[in-house]
Image (cartoon, helix red, strand yellow):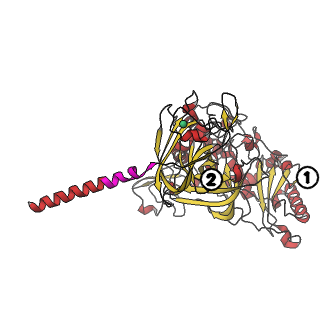
Amino acid sequence: MANNMVRFNRKIILLLFFLCYASMPSVADEKLTGVVIGSRPSVDYRTSRQSTTVNTCEKAFDGDLSTFFASWDRSYTWTGLDLGIPHVITKVGWSPRDDGNGPKRVLLGVFEGANQPDFKDALPLHIITEQGTIGKLSYAEVTCSKGFRYVRYVGPSEARCNIAEVEFYGHPGEGDLSQLHQLTNLPTVTIHTEDGIIPYDKEHEITAQLTIISDNGSHLLSGPGSIRERGNGSRSFPKRPYRIKFNQKQHVLDAPAKAKKWTLINNYGDKTLMRNLLAFELSRQMKMPYTPYCTAVDVILNGEYKGCYQLCDQVQVHKKRIDIEEMTPLDNEGIALTGGYFIEVDAYADQEPSWFYSQGGNSVTIKQPSSDSITWQQQNYIKNHFNKMEAQWQHYLDLNTFLRHFLVGELSGNTDTYWSLFLYKHRDNDTLYVGPVWDFDLAFENDNRTYPVNSKQDYIYRSGGSYAGNMRSFVDKIVVRDASAQKEMLRIWDEARMAGMTEDHLLALIDSLEELLQQSQRLNFIRWPIMNSIVHQNPRLWGSYEAEVDNVRRFIKERFAWMDNKLGYTYDGLTQTASAPSPERAIYNLQGQLMQGDFSTLPSGIYISGGRKILKR
Ligand code: CA
């Protein structure tokens, strides 16, 4: 009895100790103070003039909910604290300015921490995803284990900050990198440029620190580099596409290539944010030799949330990208002069520094060797070789990659397939190969000029698709007028269909991408409220993210049958058979997920392999 009492008391003491310990962080995590730092000057709304005394960044830290900070500049402005020494932040608080627009002007405001006063090394602490409440502080727990001396609140775009109060809570400490903040389930790419310069064209590389937080905040990649805009048509949208370049080659996320250059695709007109991802899967299923790496991410630039992007390979000569010989300015004769070359039949070629006009009436950009290193001998060589290919495609064009690329374009209903066409040439090999596939923002039923695609009798490239120069008649020669090419196309189609390129597979991918993108699409369409606006070539307003994705689903459901029919292909559907699939063929479940391991080890059920349903008993 006495023994039990002792044990009981010990339990109570342990419990009390635990309760004290558990409550310690909130005792230690005080509201932090420091020297107020931030954007200057501010705006005096009474005079509409710049001010250094009214509405200054200090007003966000004066404890008074009726005073506020409003910056003179409209975007990329902030208010924060120099804490003197690093602190691990455990909580942030905020309250909007007391005016009509106040509550929504905090939406997408970003909290950051840094150890350099210019915030070049900043990491995100929190993003505000709900409207604020006037006269009241809202709070969020912060799960970032790294300590920061400098902390700040960056107002969303065009908000002039307009924040009544900001609070940081935490405790002194250097912390560690074990747990960082990712805005959503997607990796967060955060870019901080030198002197806060915003990238403004394709020529000027802006020095920047490039940071990628992934694996639910447990992995950090951060390195110096640069950023500039990229793209052609897609550059005209307010959500800009970017090219980032690390100073050193980096392994980025799960991409195969260790490389310096990566692209951030903006997907402005593609409201599903998934068209490239779907098309790249078709490219893999069509067994293109190289399909660019591409994955969805959230992007922050200088503390401002920019939206959901796709981080993709820079399409370039590289062992894990376009694997051809890299030329030097010394490769001017003999076999050395024969490659490798990477070119693009390109409607925008005349805006590029290195391009030519072919005898067949096509404008062609020479991507590599690059414009700053290419010699006149190399220029002449590739131009002459391209002319030869136009005249005698049977001898100089790789029909295999041409047709696979064509089928990805047609199956996805891409109106841009021949608006821009990549080709490459190996050294000591006369063939021009086609690829990779690229740019699908108008595919999958997203172009009013061809909508609805499945109602067309003919291929999309002949039914309103865009093409550079004389590409349509060039493609006709192969696809429409060459019987052996048609036969080969049917063979490739059958091979891909039998290997599992099915409607079910793609629909399953759409389902999983819709789920993956759920959190990020919500933030993206707060940042870019275009769901009820026609942008780019949108054929219709579908009204919601889900309805936009449904539009792609509907298209896919019809498109496989349309293609089978157009190609004169009889798809015998998924027939049940009790026999095991041939071992070299991939096995999928009915959700389209690739099964690992041998057929005999799978649980009972129905699987798909080689385009057929297989019953596993
Ligand atoms: Ca205040």
Q: Residue furthest left?
A: 1
Give the CA distance from mark 2 to mark 1: 53 Å
Q: From what the image shows, is residue 130 above or below residue 26? A: above
The residue nearer to you, when weighing 33 against 416, is: 33
The amino acid type of the residue labelled 2 equals Phe
Work out whether residue 493 can be spotted: no
Query: Horizontal and vertical percent for residue 149?
Result: 55, 55
- 605 sits to left or right of 181: left
Q: Is residue 490 magenta?
A: no
Any mark on residue 119, and which? 2
Residue at the spot 85% in from the left edge and 54% down from the top edge = 353
Of 416 and 532, the residue lying toward us: 532
**Which of pointers 2 and 1 indicates the residue nearer the eye?**
2
Q: Which mark is residue 528?
A: none
Q: Which residues are magenta?
A: 20-33
Relative side of 487 to 505, left or right: right
Find out if the beta carbon at label 1 lies less than 8 Å from the nearest ligand 1 atom.
no
Q: Which part of the image, by quadrant, shows the C terminus? A: bottom left
Q: Main secondary structure of the magenta part?
A: helix
Q: Circle 1 sits on which residue?
A: 359
Q: Is residue 249 visible?
A: yes
Q: Residue furthest front?
A: 53
Residue 610 image position (x, y, % from top left): 55, 55
Rendered image quadrant of residue 214: bottom right
Mark 1 element type:
loop
Q: Earlier in the sequence, mark 2 or mark 1?
A: 2
Residue 28 included in the magenta stretch of the image:
yes
Q: Nearer the viewer, residue 85 or 610?
A: 85
- Given the image, on which type of amino acid does mark 1 rest? Gln
